[in-house]
Amino acid sequence: MGKYLTQTETEFVSKTVNLSKSGVFIDVGAEAGRFSLLAANSAVTVIGIDIDNYSLRRLKQKKRAVMVVQADARRIPFRDTVFDGVFMIEVLDYIPSLFEALGECHRVLKPQTPFVVSFGNQSSMKAKLRGFRGKSYTHTYRKVMQCLKETGFEVTAKLGYSWLPFGRMSESKLVSPLAGAEKLFGLRKMPSLSPWVLLRAEKSP
Protein backbone atom coordinates (compact mmCIF):
# COMPACT_ATOMS: atom_id res chain seq x y z
CA MET A 1 0.00 0.00 0.00
CA GLY A 2 2.85 2.37 0.81
CA LYS A 3 4.36 1.77 -2.61
CA TYR A 4 1.02 2.52 -4.28
CA LEU A 5 0.69 5.82 -2.36
CA THR A 6 4.23 6.94 -3.15
CA GLN A 7 3.86 5.99 -6.82
CA THR A 8 0.57 7.90 -7.13
CA GLU A 9 2.05 11.01 -5.52
CA THR A 10 5.25 10.79 -7.57
CA GLU A 11 3.33 10.46 -10.84
CA PHE A 12 1.22 13.50 -9.96
CA VAL A 13 4.31 15.58 -9.20
CA SER A 14 6.02 14.45 -12.40
CA LYS A 15 2.98 15.37 -14.51
CA THR A 16 2.23 18.74 -12.93
CA VAL A 17 5.67 20.16 -12.07
CA ASN A 18 8.48 20.88 -14.51
CA LEU A 19 11.56 19.50 -12.76
CA SER A 20 13.76 19.87 -15.85
CA LYS A 21 13.99 23.63 -15.32
CA SER A 22 16.57 24.84 -12.82
CA GLY A 23 15.36 26.51 -9.65
CA VAL A 24 15.22 26.14 -5.87
CA PHE A 25 12.44 24.05 -4.30
CA ILE A 26 11.55 23.57 -0.66
CA ASP A 27 10.12 20.29 0.66
CA VAL A 28 8.07 21.22 3.74
CA GLY A 29 7.79 18.30 6.15
CA ALA A 30 10.41 16.39 4.19
CA GLU A 31 10.74 13.46 6.63
CA ALA A 32 13.21 11.01 5.05
CA GLY A 33 12.94 12.80 1.73
CA ARG A 34 10.77 10.96 -0.80
CA PHE A 35 10.08 14.19 -2.68
CA SER A 36 13.31 15.92 -1.83
CA LEU A 37 15.10 12.99 -3.49
CA LEU A 38 12.77 13.08 -6.51
CA ALA A 39 13.52 16.76 -7.06
CA ALA A 40 17.22 16.42 -6.23
CA ASN A 41 17.60 13.92 -9.08
CA SER A 42 16.39 16.58 -11.51
CA ALA A 43 17.67 20.03 -12.44
CA VAL A 44 16.47 21.77 -9.29
CA THR A 45 18.16 22.50 -5.98
CA VAL A 46 16.25 21.21 -2.95
CA ILE A 47 15.97 22.32 0.65
CA GLY A 48 14.19 19.89 2.96
CA ILE A 49 12.71 21.19 6.20
CA ASP A 50 11.17 19.16 8.99
CA ILE A 51 10.55 19.60 12.70
CA ASP A 52 12.13 16.17 13.35
CA ASN A 53 15.93 16.19 13.29
CA TYR A 54 16.19 12.38 13.04
CA SER A 55 14.29 12.37 9.74
CA LEU A 56 16.54 15.09 8.36
CA ARG A 57 19.67 13.12 9.28
CA ARG A 58 18.28 10.14 7.38
CA LEU A 59 17.60 12.35 4.36
CA LYS A 60 21.12 13.76 4.46
CA GLN A 61 22.58 10.25 4.54
CA LYS A 62 20.62 9.37 1.41
CA LYS A 63 21.53 12.49 -0.57
CA ARG A 64 24.23 14.83 0.67
CA ALA A 65 23.35 17.38 -2.03
CA VAL A 66 20.01 18.10 -0.33
CA MET A 67 20.23 20.98 2.14
CA VAL A 68 18.29 20.28 5.35
CA VAL A 69 16.92 22.71 7.93
CA GLN A 70 15.13 21.82 11.15
CA ALA A 71 12.09 24.09 11.26
CA ASP A 72 8.35 24.26 11.86
CA ALA A 73 6.13 24.45 8.75
CA ARG A 74 4.27 27.31 10.44
CA ARG A 75 7.50 29.32 10.75
CA ILE A 76 9.55 28.74 7.58
CA PRO A 77 12.92 30.45 8.19
CA PHE A 78 13.36 32.01 4.75
CA ARG A 79 12.49 35.43 3.36
CA ASP A 80 9.56 36.18 1.06
CA THR A 81 9.29 35.01 -2.59
CA VAL A 82 12.55 33.04 -2.80
CA PHE A 83 11.41 29.58 -3.95
CA ASP A 84 10.53 28.27 -7.41
CA GLY A 85 8.37 25.48 -5.99
CA VAL A 86 7.04 24.07 -2.73
CA PHE A 87 6.11 20.48 -1.84
CA MET A 88 3.94 19.73 1.20
CA ILE A 89 3.08 16.03 0.88
CA GLU A 90 1.24 14.19 3.69
CA VAL A 91 1.96 17.00 6.15
CA LEU A 92 -1.25 19.00 6.63
CA ASP A 93 -2.84 16.31 8.80
CA TYR A 94 -0.26 17.07 11.47
CA ILE A 95 -0.99 20.82 11.37
CA PRO A 96 -4.39 21.96 12.70
CA SER A 97 -3.72 25.61 11.79
CA LEU A 98 -4.26 25.59 8.03
CA PHE A 99 -3.89 29.34 7.54
CA GLU A 100 -0.50 29.42 9.22
CA ALA A 101 0.93 26.55 7.17
CA LEU A 102 -0.53 27.54 3.80
CA GLY A 103 0.19 31.19 4.45
CA GLU A 104 3.87 30.43 5.04
CA CYS A 105 4.09 28.40 1.82
CA HIS A 106 2.47 31.28 -0.06
CA ARG A 107 4.86 33.80 1.50
CA VAL A 108 8.08 32.05 0.46
CA LEU A 109 6.89 31.06 -3.04
CA LYS A 110 7.49 33.15 -6.15
CA PRO A 111 4.38 34.16 -8.15
CA GLN A 112 3.08 31.65 -10.73
CA THR A 113 5.27 28.81 -9.47
CA PRO A 114 4.01 25.40 -8.30
CA PHE A 115 2.79 24.43 -4.86
CA VAL A 116 1.97 20.71 -4.51
CA VAL A 117 0.06 19.68 -1.40
CA SER A 118 -1.73 16.53 -0.24
CA PHE A 119 -4.09 15.91 2.67
CA GLY A 120 -6.52 13.41 4.12
CA ASN A 121 -10.13 14.43 3.45
CA GLN A 122 -12.12 14.49 6.69
CA SER A 123 -15.43 14.55 4.79
CA SER A 124 -14.75 11.30 2.89
CA MET A 125 -16.42 7.98 3.68
CA LYS A 126 -13.05 6.44 4.52
CA ALA A 127 -12.52 9.16 7.14
CA LYS A 128 -15.89 8.36 8.71
CA LEU A 129 -14.96 4.66 8.91
CA ARG A 130 -11.64 5.62 10.50
CA GLY A 131 -13.64 7.58 13.04
CA PHE A 132 -15.12 4.35 14.40
CA ARG A 133 -11.58 3.30 15.27
CA GLY A 134 -10.83 6.58 16.99
CA LYS A 135 -8.84 7.97 14.06
CA SER A 136 -9.63 10.72 11.61
CA TYR A 137 -8.21 13.19 9.14
CA THR A 138 -7.75 16.79 10.19
CA HIS A 139 -9.21 18.88 7.36
CA THR A 140 -12.14 18.71 4.95
CA TYR A 141 -11.76 19.19 1.21
CA ARG A 142 -13.93 22.29 1.36
CA LYS A 143 -11.90 23.85 4.16
CA VAL A 144 -8.57 23.31 2.38
CA MET A 145 -9.90 24.69 -0.91
CA GLN A 146 -11.32 27.73 0.85
CA CYS A 147 -8.08 28.35 2.73
CA LEU A 148 -5.99 28.07 -0.44
CA LYS A 149 -8.17 30.67 -2.11
CA GLU A 150 -8.06 33.02 0.87
CA THR A 151 -4.27 32.79 1.16
CA GLY A 152 -3.87 33.70 -2.52
CA PHE A 153 -3.47 30.37 -4.31
CA GLU A 154 -5.16 29.28 -7.53
CA VAL A 155 -5.63 25.50 -7.88
CA THR A 156 -4.60 24.22 -11.33
CA ALA A 157 -4.77 20.41 -10.92
CA LYS A 158 -6.56 17.95 -8.61
CA LEU A 159 -6.39 14.22 -7.97
CA GLY A 160 -8.31 12.00 -5.55
CA TYR A 161 -6.70 8.76 -4.36
CA SER A 162 -6.37 6.16 -1.59
CA TRP A 163 -9.88 4.76 -2.05
CA LEU A 164 -8.41 1.35 -1.19
CA PRO A 165 -9.60 -0.05 2.18
CA PHE A 166 -6.07 -0.57 3.53
CA GLY A 167 -3.57 1.22 5.73
CA ARG A 168 -0.14 2.31 4.49
CA MET A 169 1.60 -0.79 5.89
CA SER A 170 -0.77 -3.30 4.27
CA GLU A 171 0.80 -5.91 1.99
CA SER A 172 -2.53 -7.22 0.67
CA LYS A 173 -2.45 -8.77 -2.79
CA LEU A 174 -5.61 -6.80 -3.56
CA VAL A 175 -3.76 -3.46 -3.58
CA SER A 176 -2.73 -3.70 -7.22
CA PRO A 177 -6.10 -4.76 -8.73
CA LEU A 178 -8.01 -2.25 -6.58
CA ALA A 179 -5.63 0.52 -7.61
CA GLY A 180 -6.42 -0.39 -11.21
CA ALA A 181 -10.15 -0.23 -10.45
CA GLU A 182 -9.66 3.20 -8.85
CA LYS A 183 -8.37 4.46 -12.20
CA LEU A 184 -10.84 2.51 -14.33
CA PHE A 185 -13.95 3.82 -12.57
CA GLY A 186 -12.74 7.41 -12.53
CA LEU A 187 -12.54 7.71 -8.75
CA ARG A 188 -9.44 9.87 -9.06
CA LYS A 189 -11.57 12.50 -10.79
CA MET A 190 -13.68 12.98 -7.64
CA PRO A 191 -11.28 14.69 -5.23
CA SER A 192 -14.02 16.23 -3.07
CA LEU A 193 -15.15 12.70 -2.12
CA SER A 194 -11.74 11.03 -2.09
CA PRO A 195 -10.03 9.86 1.11
CA TRP A 196 -6.81 11.61 0.07
CA VAL A 197 -6.39 14.58 -2.25
CA LEU A 198 -3.42 15.91 -4.23
CA LEU A 199 -3.51 19.49 -5.45
CA ARG A 200 -1.22 21.62 -7.57
CA ALA A 201 -1.70 25.33 -7.03
CA GLU A 202 0.05 28.53 -8.00
CA LYS A 203 0.58 31.76 -6.17
CA SER A 204 -1.51 34.38 -7.93
CA PRO A 205 0.57 37.16 -9.54
Image (cartoon, rainbow, N blue to C red):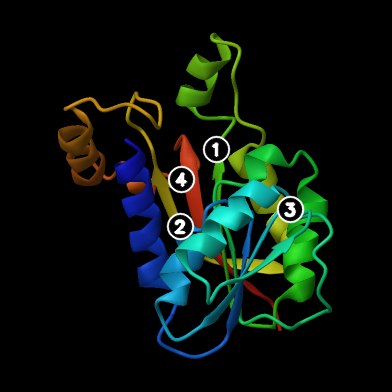
- The secondary element bearing badge 1 is classed as strand
The picture quadrant where one finds residue 23 is: bottom right
**Residues tagged 3 and 1 counted as in contact (Cβ below 8 A):** no
Amino acid at dot 4? Pro
- Going from N to C along the chain, the mark reached first, 1 or 4, is 1
The residue drawn where x is 32% and y is 53% is: 7
- The secondary element bearing badge 3 is classed as helix
- Going from N to C along the chain, the mark reached first, 3 or 2, is 2
Q: Is residue 84 left or right of residue 71?
A: left
Marks 4 and 3, how far apart in space?
16 Å
- Viewer-nearest of labels 4 and 2? 2
Task: List x then y, in percent, for residue 45.
Answer: 55, 82
The picture quadrant where one finds residue 164 is: top left
Amino acid at dot 1? Gly
- The secondary element bearing badge 4 is classed as loop
Nearer to the camera, 56 or 104: 56
Residue ID for mark 2: 34
Residue ID for mark 3: 147
Q: Residues within 10 Å of mark 4 (few under 14, many from 20)?
A: some
